[in-house]
Amino acid sequence: MIDHVELKSRDVEASKAFYEQVLKPLGYERRPAGNGIGFADGTGFDFFLVAGEPPSDVHFAFRAGTRDQIDEIYENAGSAGFTLDRAPALAPHIHPNYYAGYLRDPDGRLVEFVCHAAV
């Protein structure tokens, strides 16, 4: 299991606003993080943003407990003017219950939100 992830961002404030919005339905809250910005979900996994030049070819996924959470994240992101990539949908080529939606963060990274539950 991954303990934490740190991502570099060209605009940490824009990324902070993005991740605060999209991670809220999953229970993440902003935490102090030294010279960066941290988010934690209470399970022991932490997510950090720091200033720097980000790689452009990163794709990662946050697990959601329900499909409704993914729909909420996607709808809220659209309302906030964030970049939508792919609308939430089943991806049966991965497995019958794979439900995912995709956004682009302010640095252009592909951020996926996925639920593996059968409804």
Image (cartoon, helix red, strand yellow):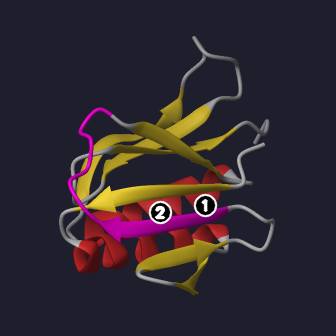
Residue position for label 1: 69
Does the magenta segment cover residue 19? no
- Amino acid on which the number 2 mark rests in the picture: Ile
Q: Which mark is residue 17?
A: none
Does the magenta segment cover residue 52? yes
Measure the C-alpha gap from mark 2 to mark 1: 6 Å
Residue 53: x %, y % from top left: 20, 54
**Which residue occupies 56% across, 64% down?**
47
Q: Secondary structure at mark 2?
A: helix
Residue position for label 2: 73
Contact between marks 2 and 1 (CB within 8 A): the answer is yes
The magenta segment is 46-57
- Amino acid on which the number 1 mark rests in the picture: Gln
**Which residue occupies 22% across, 54% down?**
107
Q: Secondary structure at mark 1?
A: helix
> Would you place residue 2 above or below residue 79 in this image?
above
Residue 15: x %, y % from top left: 30, 70
Residue 119 in view of the camera: yes
